[in-house]
Amino acid sequence: MATEDSLNHSMNSALKHYSSMFFLPSYKKSLLAIAVVCIVVVGLSSFALFPSIQGLTSGLVLGISLFALTLIADSVMSRIILKVDPIYLLRRALALSFFCWLLWLFFIAIGVVLGFAFGWLLWVKLCLLGYAAVVTLRGVVLIATSSVAMWRKLMSVLLNPTLCIIAFLVFWGGISSAILIQVLPFLVISPIIGCAVVFLFLSSLDRLGQKTYSIPSLPLFRAFMLNWVVGLNAPLEEFFEKMGENADVEVTLLKFDSSKPKAAVIVPLVHPGPFKNIGSSLLPSLLKHGFEREFGCDTCVPLGILGHELDLASQAQNHKIVSQVIASAKFKASSDLASPFVKVTEGAATASCQIFGDTALLSFTLAPKTTEDLPQELGRIVCGEAEKYGIKYAMVVNAHNSINDIVDTEEYLDALQMAASKCLQKAVTLPTKQFMVGAATVFPKEFNLKDGMGTGGITAIVVQVEKQKTAYVVIDGNNMISGLREKILAALTSVGFGESEVFTTDTHAVSAIVTGRRGYHPVGEVMSHEILTRYICEVAKKAEANLETSKAGCIHFVVPQVRVIGETRLQSMTILVDKSIQKAKQTLLPVFGLEGLVLILLLLLL
């Protein structure tokens, strides 16, 4: 089975391609660049061949006409022809035209140079060849990326270059009217050849997907692009729904009540991925906010013991989980006794445990070594171990709070199991006392998704048993850099807390937003540690300030028939996108080079 690291790598590879394709200039920059290319460069290039006052005037008129026609064509394309396509706003339409003008300018420049030696007719023919190249480029981009009807795509491909070539024809007609009849066959035939080659090229990419993964490449490509470029999740989630399978999802909910709901810890056995706003990536924050709206208490959603084998397929599945959790949480907590918080270290593994009535809240970390996803089997073993001590519910949490360049979690599974067993044994031997709970949440304004902070912010649940005050700090992020956990725990100690622990939700809402080795920033990689630690101490103190005598209650239930998509299928989809773009790059030169040869031969016949 593929590892999470390899899945992140394949998604990051695909993202790099998308980032390079859609790193576009702003509207104003595109407009200015097109004006410079059309009016200054193209317009004055004609003056170079016809150096006279009339030549200068005609060249400037040509350049201004090309600029105006480009703006008109792109406005019509974005606002009328492709108005239902969220990608091609006027800014992106102009950016596409700018790159097309750069391509056309290449042929125009060669034509000007050769025109000095062999006559202006060669400049005309090179302009025509540039026109054909632009039609082909627009065909590849628009047909591959746009989701509208084919007739709309073809209109968008042809409108801009057709209007611009008409401006050239008017200019050439002022020199020699015979030229219009001479070039007409090429103007009719070259777009047909270009579109045919584009369809052949894109069909080969589609066949790659069908042959390799039984997935058509282009619709999947468009779905990925709609997500990465404009944030639409529905097109890609349609693929996930079709390719996924139904599964029963387990959820454990630990709730604290005082005179009213005080705090909650929710651990669904769902992986919060695969990336951005797709599938269950946002589930931790969705669960948090949904539960808080319903019950008015601070809530956190740390990571359970599992990997990418249970990513939800769509937002509809998220809603199913959230609704079931809220419906199941309407019970009264009744356990008024808790053990002190304890930690046990076995080699590199650390287990923490606190018992509330008949419920054990147990967590794992390998910090400062990498603590990534842990196998479900470990959770089942620990739950079985807890039953031996008379514990009815075991909420087992992966702290997911340390990452470096070495991922060797499998090596420490025995140590984790041993640490859990010793920690449980130690916790059950301690006397239980009445306890107090306080909770608070903060949303740091300095940090956002690109920095690695999800929309769930930072939640602190403080538990006091006699004189021991323990802070459970949950950060809505995807892991944290090695060493930061220890800094945070030291800071909490300095403000009056005893043994504590810090967790991340493993939200993948922060993934596939930035490029880099991982495709996301773990907590603390680009954040100020000083600011982050200050927020954590402040939210912990705020939680401490509202400590109240509380009771705990836990339930374990199953949400049936939830649509999930596994890690292997996810990786195959992201690899397919990557492979399709790589194949496109590899076949681009031979396929369109052959088209160029055919068009050159056609021009030689003029």
Image (cartoon, rainbow, N blue to C red):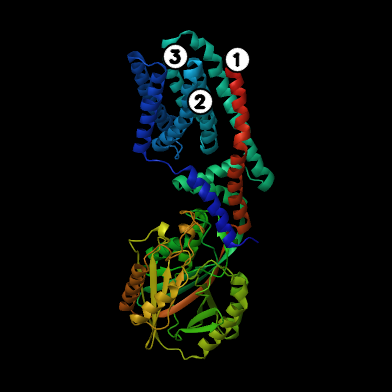
Question: How far apart are the two marked residues, 2 and 3, measured between alpha carbons?
Answer: 16 Å
For this orientation, the residue located farthest to the front is 117
Q: Nearer the viewer, residue 100 or 209?
A: 100
Residue 172: tell me if it is visible: yes
Mark 2 falls on what kind of element?
Answer: helix
Mark 1 falls on what kind of element?
Answer: loop
* The N terminus - image quarter: bottom right
Could you tell me residue 353's position as x and y percent?
A: 50, 81
Residue at the spot of label 2: 130
Could you tell me residue 34's position as x and y percent?
A: 38, 31
Q: Nearer the viewer, residue 13 or 122?
A: 122
Question: How far apart are the two marked residues, 3 and 1, measured between alpha carbons?
Answer: 19 Å
What residue sits 49% from the left and 72% below the top? 399
Residue at the spot of label 3: 172
* Whether residue 465 is situated above or below residue 80 in the rendered picture: below
Mark 2 touching mark 3, by CB under 8 A?
no
- The amino acid pointed to by label 3 is Trp
- The amino acid pointed to by label 1 is Leu
Question: How far apart are the two marked residues, 2 and 1, measured between alpha carbons?
Answer: 17 Å
Could you tell me residue 144's position as x and y percent?
A: 55, 37
Image-based side of 468 in relation to 187, left or right: left
Q: Nearer the viewer, residue 601 or 19?
A: 601
What residue sits 61% from the left and 46% below the top? 579
Mark 3 touching mark 1, by CB under 8 A?
no
Ranked by sequence position, the earlier of labels 2 and 1 is: 2
Residue at the spot of label 1: 605
**Mark 1 neighbour density, 10 Å: few (under 14) some (14–19) many (20 or more):** few
Could you tell me residue 32's position as x and y percent?
A: 35, 34
Image-based side of 26 in relation to 391, left or right: left
